[in-house]
Structures are given as structure tokens and as C-alpha cells.
Image (tube, coloured by chain):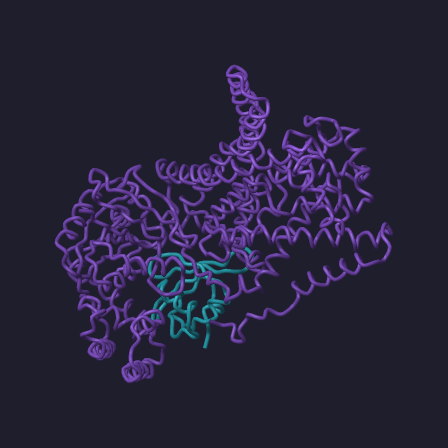
Chain colours: A cyan, B purple
Amino acid sequence: MRTLKDAKIGSTVRVVKLCGKGPLKRRIMDMGITKGTQIYLRKVAPLGDPIEVHVRGYELSLRKSEAENIFVEKA
Amino acid sequence: MEIKVALAGNPNSGKTTLFNSLTGSNQYVGNWPGVTVEKKEGRLKGNKDVLIVDLPGIYSLSPYTLEEVVTRDFLMNEKPDVIINLVDATNIERNLYLTTQLAEIGIPMVIALNMIDLLKNFGDDINIDKLSKEIGFDIVEVSALKGTGVLEVATKAVELAKRKEKAIPVHKFGSDVERALSQIGSLIKNRDDIPDELLRWFSVKLFERDKKVIEQLKLSGDISDKIEKIISDIEKMHDDDSESIITNERYEFITKVVASTVKKHRGNMTVSDKIDRVVTNRILALPIFALVIFIIYFISVSTLGTIITDWTNDVFFGEWVTGAAATLLTKIGTAEWLSDLILNGIIGGVGSVLGFVPQMFLLFFFLSLLEDCGYMARVAFIMDKIFRKFGLSGKSFIPLLISSGCGVPGVMATKTIENEKDRRMTTMVTTFIPCGAKIPVIALIAGAMLPDYAGLVAPAVYFIGIFAVIVSGIALKKTKLFAGDPSPFVMELPQYHVPSVKGLWVHMWERGSSFIKKAGTIIFVSSAVIWFLSNFGISGGSVGMVEGSKSFLGMIGGFIAPVFAPLGFGTWQATVATFSGLVAKENVVATFGIFFGLGNEIIEDDPTLLNMVAQLFPSVVAGMSFLIFNMLCAPCFAAIGAIRKEMASGKWTLIAVGYQTLLAYIFSLIIYQVGGLLIGALTFGLGSVAGIIALVFVLYMLFRPNPYLKKDLKM
């Protein structure tokens, strides 16, 4: 399965599953990335990391290492 | 009777603006006990009985971040009478997520729906009555920026507080989760420490396996087992952990509510999105960032800022205040020693620090501007990749850069870093960057010891400063103090907006004035102490004014000097100069001037001084070792005062200053001993062994595997 890290910039994906546990997973979910949420990949930072996504009507940035824990499918 | 109102909401929801319009200038800023999180309180305008506590901006009440824990503890233990929950209408789904958690605490609550005018500009619309019914709390429309609806919200909150009804949450999760929660509820019902209105809160927390709540309730083994069985059944069904199930359920509820109450006609791109497309563009982002930083640095550090600082130091304190005080003191016939204490010790010491205040205000103005308009979050976005390698945050760039001008505002700029570990680390390392006051010292030592290569010494010192920051970041990350999983970066990039003049002013004033108050006291005392020690000593059996090596400071210097012998500068002069550098780094030059009978008005490129200093140090490496020690060791008292203020802890201040001095010692030891061996100034001996051990130790700290790193790196 693909993760958010591998998704193309400019594409929209849907969250299938979040792996892991603890503070990081809770933080990602607190910010509104939950199962079934649509995510639009806005851009990648000039140095190649982190990435910026549009989720639930606002802009969120996260590192690629964090995006790796979010499994997605094409929306 | 006093009414306590808690103001809660997400970061960037306009909470500070609302707090300012609720309280006016009637505020008190402090810290939450024991942590570096800022606590603001104020009295409601026009009603002194109402105390408003501004809680930290948070997204959730999870037990993982400091801000969230502080908020949770405050709400649970201090039981405010009512909560005002500020919700940003333009970002309603994520904002309501916190609302569903606050709803379970049992405290009456009113929702202040902010930025609804902006939402309507987008072409969206909210059915407020319906929303209020579904969420279960009254909603008041406000515009924190324009100040509309603020009075209504306050009135509503006071009314709710007086009614003293407990709030019972109305939101519901999926039926299977609700069933599990009520099963848990019936197991813990009828306990004295669980009132009815908190039954859902405790059931949810137990379901989430919240450690704090489990500890607090001390459930019997039998009940714990039953609860565990309920949870693990649901976890199997949902194929997820219970904490995530609850988060999911909250958002499911919100998605449903928002779908039926908010009409979206919004296009894809707002003005903010368009700005951001340029500003954090892959190609343009770095040039734009460099330009922004250049403008700020140019105005507040190199041009206008320096002019203001020089004027305050030389004219305002140097001539006006000192002059007026001198005249006054002579007029009233003050003893010579006392006027010297007041003029040179206190006005000189405090003045040299307060001289930075106007410049700091200028700098804080720019920082507030960056933060309030939304660019600061982009700085972190752009710089994160580089800085996280050293255990710092992308936002650490700003304090480090400012420190090249002056460490005091540099340390204070760490306030913009949210994560406490990152903030503490940045505070500890930022003064390694040579500041403006260190430049005369560099010029003096370079001119005395390496006159032919003086131009190369300054860049080398800057390089060593940056190197010290990097080494510290990498090494400290692996120590117990800073160990732990890297803090999640997951960060909101708020909408750009034009900051309000009033907001900027409040922001700037808060930072500037708190420095004057808190740092002022430590500087006042320490300047007076150093003045006393350097001017007094025992002469003829009693304490009196003496000079040089006979002063207390000279004696202390002579006593401590052997400590610096392994670094190549174990003389009392070099030791005392180092101590006097604690008042202000440029004092090192004046102190040498006094010792060599050249007076304290000496400039750093005076040939006689250069010659004398050159004779003080036995070799080039000894001089360089002295220079590096003075660059890296504890900064001046003003900066230590700022560190104390930002760390909000005496212990952490000691750790920071102790660490800096230790690092300076190790670096200087390596430079003197290993460097001396390499250029043939020293022969192999015990010192060389110590130097080599120090070098190996530094390399070990840099390259050893992280003992605190868990095997499963991912989450």
C-alpha cells in the first residue's frame, strides 16, 4: 500500500490507515488526519522536506518521515 | 464574588486578540508553574470581579504536549466557573475537535465563533442555531479583530457562571463505542470522586488508557480487567488502538455536524493560498527568505539598531544620566567610593544592558510582525530540514542569527519555538554565536597574537561558534536532558493576514518590558558585586579601595588562575579579564587597559596594549585558547538574565551556563594542548594527554550511537 510520502504533489488522496501509536500518531490524528479524510498534496519545501498538505480546509505541514505512517489510496 | 473564566482555543484562532479586547491593558503575564509555557491573566474590562485566564493555544487535550497537559490540569484541578471556547469559523472542523473535548469536562461553556465575516467573504455560510443545538452549547458570533460581539460573549459567560449548572455533553459517537463507554461508565459510577457530569470524561479517558486518569482512580484489579476486556473487544472490531478510535469518532461526529450546518461555496484558492504559492515556492522560497532576513538584520542589527544602541549607551547613559548623577552626587557631597559605585558600577553596568532595550524593541517589532502575519511558521517549514539534524527546530534560525548582533534579544527570540526541548536547546546554544560586543576582544587578541593573519581570526571564531552550536545539538540530543523521540513536526501553516497595529504593540511591549523587569534585577546585583570585588581589597589590615592584583577580584583571580593553566592562560590578569567579561564582553579590553596602566578608555588596536597583551600569553595557541574561552563560556549577565527569563527555571539556567563554560573549557583545552603540540609550542606531557582525551571525548559524544533511541523509530 502507498503512503502519503510517496503520493504525487498536486494529487488528492484518501486516508486508509494510520500505523504506529503514541504521541506522533495522536498528533497527526488530532490535526484532523483520520481514516477516510481527503488530503490534497500542496507542495514540498524548497529543501525537499517537509511537505505541505491541505486537509479539512486548512494547510498542514509534516515531515516525510511522519507522512510515511499514513497509508493512502487515490481519492 | 470572583468569577474565573478560562479562555480556550486553537493556536491562530485569534485568541490573543480576543483576550486583549476582553481585558484591555489590564493583564498580568507570567509562566505556568515549573514550565516555560506563558500564562496570561487579566480582569474583564468594566468588571473587576471577573478574572480571565488565557490558556495556551492547543489543538487537543491529549496527555502528550506540555501546553495540553497544563491546560488539562488547570481545567480539572482549578475548576474555572466557565469556559469561553474560541472557534475559528474559517477552520471549523479542526477547531470543533477541541470543543468536543472541552465539552466533557463538565464546566459550563460558551462558544465564541470568530472570523465569521471572513467566512462570509469566502461565500460560505453557517446555520448557527442548528450548530449550537447539535454541539450542545450557546454560540456567540464575534470578530476579535474588530471587537464586535466581545461584550456579548463576556455577558453570556458571566451569566452561565452565575447559573452554576454543570454542563453535560450531548455529542454522541458510533453506537458500538457509545455502548463500550456506558459499560465502562457503569463500572465506575457512584464513586465520590466522579460526579455525574464527569462520568463521560472518565469513561473516555479510561477507554483511551490515559495513564494519568488510571493512576488517579486506582481501580481494583477486577474492574481494570473488565474495562480492558471491553476496550480490547472494540479495538479488534475497529482494527485500531482505543485512543485512535476516540479521535476518529470525534471527527466523524464533527464531519456530520459540519456537513449539515455549513454551506461551502469556497473556491480552491484564497488570497492567502496565492501568497503562499509564491512565498514558499520551491525556487523563490529561499531567496525571499534571505531577503526578509537581510532586511530585518540590516535595520535592527547593523544600521538603525546600532545607531540607537550607541546613542543610548554613549549619549543617554554615558553623558546625560552619568553627567546628571555626577553633578548631583558632588552637590550633596557623596563619598568618592559611593559615587564611583553609583556611576561606574551601577549606572555603567545597568546602563550597558538597558542600552540594548531600544534595539530590542525594534527587533521584537519585526519578530512580532513575522509571527502575527503568519510567516514565522513558513520559516520553520523552509529551514526544518537543516536544523532538525542538530536537534533544533527550523525556527532556531532566527535566534541564532539575532545572536550574531546581541545574545540578549537572540535568547528572547527563542520564545517563538513551540516545542520545549527545542526551545531549551536553542537557548543553551544561541550565545555561542559571537555577538557585537565580542568583536573588540577578537580584534585585540588577533592583533596581539597573530598580527599578520588578523583578518582570518574573526571568520575562524565565527566558524568555531557555529561549530559549537552543531556539536552541542548533536551531542546533547543523545543525553538524558534532551533524549526522547524527536518531537512531531506536524504543524499548522496559518493563513496569512495583515497584523493589527495594536496586536503588534502589545506583543512587542510584553517581551520588551518583561526583559527589563526580570533581567534588570540580576544585572543590577551582579554589576554591583563585580564592581565591589574589583575595586576593594584588604589594605593595611582593613577593607578599602585598592587596585589591580590587590583587589578581591585580583585575589580571587590569582586563586582561580591555576584552573586555567592547562588552557595556557593561568595568570591572574587573564582570569580577572574573563570575569569582567561577564558584565559585558567588551570589558575584557578595558580590563587589560587598566592592568597595563593604560586606563580604561583604551581601544583594542592601541599598539602598546597589543604589545603588552602579546607578552601576557606565552604562545599563539595560548592567546587563541583565551579568546575561544571568552567567546564560548558563560555569556554576559544580561544574556544570563535573558536565559533565566526564557528557561523559567533556576536549575535550567545553571545547566545552560554550566554547559557553556564546560564546552568552552574543553574547546580551549584542545586548542591549547593539541594545537600547541602540532605547532611545536609545547612538548608532550600530562597536558597533551588531557588535550587528546578531551578531543577523543568530543568525538565520542558526536559519533556514539544514541543510547536513548528506541529500536522502532517509527512512532
Percent x, y for residue B94? 31, 60
Which residue occupies the foreground of this view, B444 or B362?
Answer: B444
User: Which residue sits furthest left?
Assistant: B163
Depth order, front residue of B334/B566: B334
Q: Residue B75: horizontal and vertical position, in percent?
A: 28, 58
Query: Is residue B65 left or right of B606 when viewed as pictured?
Result: left
With B162 as the anchor, is B323 left or right in this view?
right
Left or right placement of residue B499 versus residue B649 in this view: left
For this orientation, the residue located farthest to the front is B541
Q: Residue at x 23, y 62 (%)?
A: B103
Q: Disc count in the image?
A: 0
Q: Is residue B371 above or below residue B302?
A: below
Q: Check the image and report above or below for B316 versus B128.
A: above
In this rendered view, identify the residue nearer to me: B693 or B522: B522
Whole-percent x, y for residue A18 in the image: 40, 73
Give residue B16's position: percent from left, percent from top.
33, 46
- Residue B194's place in the image compared with B516, above or below, is below
**Point 25% across, 57% down: residue:** B79
Q: Is residue B565 left or right of residue A70?
A: right
Q: Is residue B304 something that shows in the picture?
A: no
Q: Is residue B681 visible?
A: yes
Examine the image and state in which quarter residue B144 appears: top left
Depicted B476 relative to depicted B274: above or below: below
**Residue at (56%, 42%) from the top-left corner?**
B407
Residue ID at (42%, 71%): A22
